[in-house]
Structure formats: C-alpha cells, structure tokens
Amino acid sequence: MISSSPPAGKSPGGCGRGEYGRHDAVYMAANGPIKFLIDKLTLDPQGYDATIMAARSSFLDTRPPNNSIDSVLLVGEIRQWGAELGFQQVGISDIDLSVAEKRLTSWLKKSYHGDMSYMSRHGLKRSRPDTLVPGTLSIIAVRMDYLPKESEPPENLLDHPRKAYLSRYALGRDYHKVLRSRLKALAKKIEDRIGPLGHRVFVDSAPVLEKPIAEKAGLGWIGKHSNLINRDAGSWFFLGELYTDLKLPADVAETSHCGTCSECIEVCPTGAIVAPYQVDARRCISYLTIELKEAIPVELRPLIGNRVYGCDDCQLFCPWNKFAVPTGEKDFAPRQDLDSVDLVDLFSWTENEWLEKTEGSAIRRIGYERWLRNIAVALGNAETTDSVIAALTQKRSGESKLVSDHVEWALGQHSNSSE
C-alpha cells in the first residue's frame, strides 16, 4: 500500500529539489494532483516551477486532448461566464510579448522606474509568460469598471483649497481582492466544463505585463499616458489575468486611437509624461505618493496640490472617458467619505483610526507614515487658515523624521504666503 504522507524531511515522493521523478508520479497517482501540489510546495517551496510542471502533466492526463475541445465554443462560454461574474470584457491573448519586452527594456535603461526595483528584478519572466508559469499557452484577460458614482465631477476637487483628492480606484474595497476572487471563480467554471486546468491568477501582482496583454486581448490600446483605453468605456477599469495551459484562439489586438491628441501630456501636473507613451515614474504623482518610500523631492511638492494618494489627471481629461459609465459594483463605492473629505480631518486620524478606516482598502499598502507625509504636502499647498496651521503644528513633533520634515516644509509654505 502506498503511503498517503510524504517521507519526513523530503518533498513528496522523496525526489530532490527541482526534480520531478518516478516517486513523485507514484505519490501523485495515489493522492491526486491537488494534495501533491500542497505537500510539494509546503516541503519544497523553491521547487515551484518543477511542481507546476509535474502537476500539469497529471492534469493533462485526466483532461480531454486540447484538439478534442471546441476552443471557439469554449471561448464563447468563458466570455459569458466572465460577464456573469461582473467583468465588462473578456479577451484572449497569446504569449508573444516580444514588442512589449523591447519597450520595457528601453524604459528600464532610462531609469524611469525610479526606486521600483521589482520592475527589473525578475529578468524575462515579466515579458515571457511561459517562463513565469511553465506550460502557459494562452492568457485570459479581463477588465472591470471601477469609476464610482459621485455627486459632483471629480475634476472639481483638483487643487481644492481644503479637500483631499484620492485616486478614484482607491475609494472603495481593495480591487486585488475583488478581481482575484472573481478570476478564481472563472477558472473553476472552466474546470467544471473541461476538467483539471493548469492555471494561475494575477491581479496587478507578480511580474506580469498586464497592459500589453490586455492590448493583445483586444480590451483596449495603451494610450500616450501608458494607461489602457477602451473606445467604448474609456480607461476607468481594472485588469486581471488568468494564465492557462489551454491553447485558445487569440483575439485581434486593439490599435491606437489617440491620434494627434496630447491632452494627457499637457495636463500632467508634474510633466511626468515626457513623451508620447513614455512616463518617467520619478515625476509621476502616483509614484511619489504610493511607491516612493523616502522624502518627496522638494521641487515637486508644490505641483502635487491636494493629491494625497495617486493621481487621475491624465484620465480625467482624456476625451475617451466621455464614454465611461459609473460602476455598479458596490465594492468600489467610496468609503469613509474619501471622495470628498477635508485634508485637516484626514490628518487628524490616529494610526489606530487609520488602520480601522482603511481596512480592506488598497490605501493600506503605503502605511500610516507615508499617509501623513502625503497629507502634510497637500496641507502645505492648501489655503492658509487657522485650522490648517493648527493641524500642522500639532504634528510638528512626536512623528517620524520623514513626517516632521514634510510638516516643516508645509508650515514654511504658509509662512512664505503670509509675508
């Protein structure tokens, strides 16, 4: 009788790290591919790629041959299931991202990624899907609208003398959680239809070129601001990917429809769009308020205005967004009145209050310190009032050096404006 537990101190079947041999095959045959995956990854987390390949071999043994599956019919069903799960569009991409790879390499050489070292950390895995997930043959790409319903146009809040502006994608529940659960449900529907499916879900995570993939899947084109634009829905949507070992017919890639328009380039507060389709992240407000962990460059602080988390200017003024429709997803509805909240009120949140009020939000990723740093800059750009000065003075000491330095700068701005 074959034991249902792996030998102590070894990966299932006793194989060496990174190997898939006879013992693994026997163990999987006795226990099934799912238990094999769990045990193998628990005992040998570094052998991820080999494990996936081994499990995939088992999956393919129990699934009808790809040529016996009506792939065109299946794609139609996948689109239907995607719509039922709340995705506004589902497309299929192949795994050839060679053009995007060249653009990425050029962008990295110019150091436009700033401190985002993860953009270059994974070598070619980002642009070669079958290197990241061995066995990948096709990618199912999806988009989900997130623009919330608001009482007044969000552009009216830009550079408001008292209120904060947060990127509209961050007003509600963390999109990673929403899309990831829906994509997992989509994978389950596919498995129910054809049997075991080799797959992996991604939502703005891991080294994945989500926008080039979405472009190849026909979901839209990459605009001059580097965001994806859909001719019928604008650009207010999230993207997600399902890497699969299915060979599916790819959709026709979308082509650019930006024409001679340069609105996004002209309205960028910090001049981060240095050329069409080229963004220097080091100047981008989204990078400065979210990715950057250190002090915000002094020369860029006045240009940030009241934007405390991300920036939407290039989308707010894009002509294609006249076709955008507010989302019906309740998860993306604004929380804590973040769509129209006073800067002084945000600055008064204690760390415990911040943790409570941002629970389940994408805002959590920057931490309380950077949250205060960002608001201090916005208060420095706000109108000079007694409440603003009092709020800044209260945080003058007792906070980290990063925060106190930005508070001092902000107070200096008001001191200069009163002279």
Image (cartoon, rainbow, N blue to C red):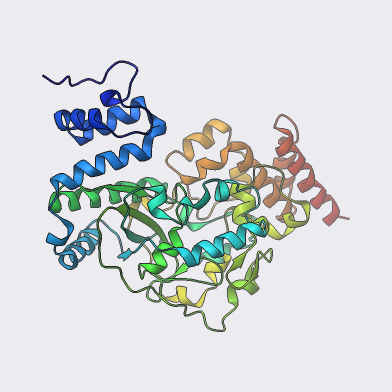
Q: Is residue 400 above or below residue 143?
A: above
Can you see residue 151? no
* Viewer-proximal residue among 376 and 15: 15
* Viewer-proximal residue among 147 and 196: 196
Q: In which quarter of the image is the C terminus?
A: bottom right
Q: Which residue is drawn at 31% across and 41% down?
A: 52
Can you see residue 128? yes
Q: Residue at x 52, y 74 (%)?
A: 318
Residue 162 image point, x, y percent: 64, 55
Residue 376 image point, x, y percent: 69, 46
* Viewer-proximal residue among 382 and 13: 13
Q: Residue furthest front?
A: 22
Q: Quadrant of residue 314?
A: bottom right
28 relative to 97 in the view: left or right = left
Q: Which residue lies furthest to the top in this view?
A: 8
Residue 303 image point, x, y percent: 71, 60
Q: Residue at x 14, y 28 (%)?
A: 30
Q: Is residue 370 above or below residue 230?
A: above
67 relative to 49 in the view: left or right = left
Residue 25 image point, x, y percent: 21, 33
Q: Residue at x 56, y 42 (%)?
A: 366
Q: Residue furthest right?
A: 419
Q: Residue furthest bottom?
A: 260
Q: Quadrant of the N terminus?
A: top left
158 relative to 122 in the view: left or right = right
Q: In this view, does 46 lie above or below 335?
A: above
